[in-house]
């Protein structure tokens, strides 16, 4: 057959975080003892009270269509959470519940972009942002945060990147892959540029509950009326409540944007899973003790990983302040050789460490940095220890 397929679909790269995780799982299924620092997926079970709410939903027959943009009950729970935790006021008609954080973001770009609109994507970026922008006919424009500024972009860099075609900037704090957190002052400066230039902020706050030490999560929409109007605040349940498989994401925006997104979703997927929505109500309104317990465990792992990586040869990292990732600079290691082969790229580093040392890491070319890797510390402590021992052995074997 010679029928042409969609050019738009053809330029999208498959998600390498998911591919690496799948490969590590496959190697494990084949009996290999692989340590997976790949996808950011908490290793904890979903808390019992949340699971119980889902079981009750099934037993009560809450298994039918709900309104396409989510139940009123869950929208109200999301509004309360926005009010209490993020200090942002949204009404239920400003909320859309979707099938996970990714779906929420994809809906946003579909609703705000016209062909040729530019979206500023601070780099390093979570690899799906540019692909989503392209799928929605937009043009992703990378702006590199300086390592000396913890890889965060400044308000001035944002201003310089804005053109008449700029429609939005993406913010992701705490950040995947760096674990860096924007301060209130930094966000205020960025908000001013956004308002002065009249663009949108797509604020992906999926890691909002995971901050450590003195880092504070600040929602940019909470900083004033002008920035509130221009912000689409996105989040989800996956990371904070260990609910990756349940697929519940949500956003708060102007009622006009929420309505558009609700219409798109009504054709694309209908409602998110009814049972998962009931579970999400319990997650947001029930006890938050398990969230804090998981956060503390991530913090312990973070500190351990940071100390270990700092002590390794040919690698360096900044101390992450949020999320559950460490972004590791391998520029020195990549100029070296393993068994006579010069490594050159983080992709090759990742291939060798997986094949020879059974450690899965994420090479970050798709995150905008081909000399960095990302490790997730959302895996058990004993696995972290074994994996870091192996990584250290690999780095020591370089010449
Ligand atoms: N967001 C997680 C990560 O970056 C899950 C995998 C994915 O969707 O990319 O690892």
Image (cartoon, rainbow, N blue to C red):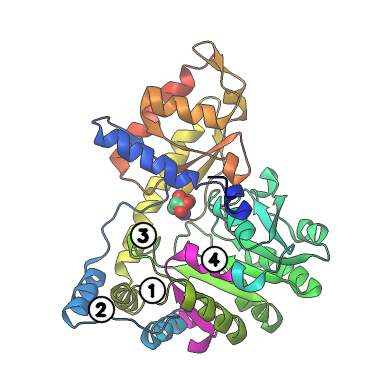
Q: Is disc 4 in contact with disc 3, using a CB cutoff of under 8 Å?
A: no
What range is drawn magenta here? 81-108
Asked whether, in this view, residue 104 is left or right of residue 286, the answer is right
Task: Name the residue that disc number 2 marks.
Answer: 63
Can residue 272 be seen here? The reply is: yes
The structure residue drawn at horizontal position 60% and vertical position 59%, both measured from the top left corner, is 135
Task: Name the residue that disc number 1 marks.
Answer: 272
Disc on the earlier residue, 2 or 3: 2
Residues under labels 3 and 1: Cα distance?
A: 14 Å
Disc on the earlier residue, 4 or 2: 2
Disc on the earlier residue, 1 or 4: 4
Quadrant in which residue 21 is drawn: top left
Asked whether, in this view, residue 46 is left or right of residue 94, the answer is left
Task: Name the secondary structure under disc 1.
Answer: loop
Q: Is residue 231 above or below residue 245?
A: below
Residues under labels 2 and 1: Cα distance?
A: 11 Å
Mark 3 within 8 Å of ligand 1, using the beta carbon: yes
Disc on the earlier residue, 4 or 3: 4
Q: Is the magenta stretch mostly helix, strand or loop?
A: helix
């Amino acid at each position: 057959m010679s029928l042409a397929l969609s050019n738009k679909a053809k330029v999208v790269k498959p998600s390498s975080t998911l591919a690496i995780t799948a490969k590590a799982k496959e190697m494990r299924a084949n009996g290999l003892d692989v340590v997976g620092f790949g996808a950011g997926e908490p290793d904890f079970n979903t808390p019992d009270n949340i699971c119980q709410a889902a079981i009750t939903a099934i037993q009560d027959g809450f298994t039918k269509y709900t309104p396409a943009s989510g139940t009123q009950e869950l929208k109200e729970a999301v509004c309360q959470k926005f009010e209490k935790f993020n200090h942002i006021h949204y009404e239920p008609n400003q909320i859309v519940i979707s099938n996970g954080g990714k779906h929420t973001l994809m809906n946003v770009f579909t609703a705000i972009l016209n062909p040729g609109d530019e979206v500023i994507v601070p780099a390093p970026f979570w690899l799906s942002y540019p692909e989503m922008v392209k799928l929605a006919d937009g043009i992703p424009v990378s702006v590199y945060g300086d390592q000396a500024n913890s890889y965060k972009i400044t308000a001035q860099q944002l201003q310089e990147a804005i053109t008449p075609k700029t429609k939005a900037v993406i913010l992701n704090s705490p950040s995947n892959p760096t674990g860096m957190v924007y301060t209130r002052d930094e966000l205020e400066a960025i908000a001013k540029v956004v308002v002065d230039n009249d663009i949108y902020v797509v604020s992906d706050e999926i890691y909002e509950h995971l901050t450590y030490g003195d880092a504070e999560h600040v929602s940019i929409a909470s900083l004033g009326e002008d920035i509130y109007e221009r912000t689409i605040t996105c989040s989800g349940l996956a990371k904070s409540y260990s609910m990756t498989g349940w697929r519940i994401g949500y956003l708060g925006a102007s009622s006009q944007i929420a309505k558009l997104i609700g219409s798109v979703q009504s054709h694309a997927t209908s409602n998110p899973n009814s049972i998962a929505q009931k579970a999400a109500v319990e997650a947001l309104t029930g006890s938050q003790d398990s969230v804090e317990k998981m956060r503390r465990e991530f913090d312990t792992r973070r500190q351990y990983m940071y100390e270990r990586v700092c002590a390794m040869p040919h690698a360096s990292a900044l101390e992450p302040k949020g999320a559950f990732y460490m972004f590791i600079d391998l520029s020195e290691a990549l100029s070296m050789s393993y068994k006579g082969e010069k490594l050159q790229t983080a992709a090759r580093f990742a291939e060798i460490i997986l094949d020879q040392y059974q450690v899965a890491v994420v090479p970050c070319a798709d995150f905008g940095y081909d000399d960095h890797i990302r490790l997730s510390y959302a895996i058990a402590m004993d696995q972290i220890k074994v994996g870091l021992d192996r990584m250290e052995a690999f780095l020591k074997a370089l010449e």
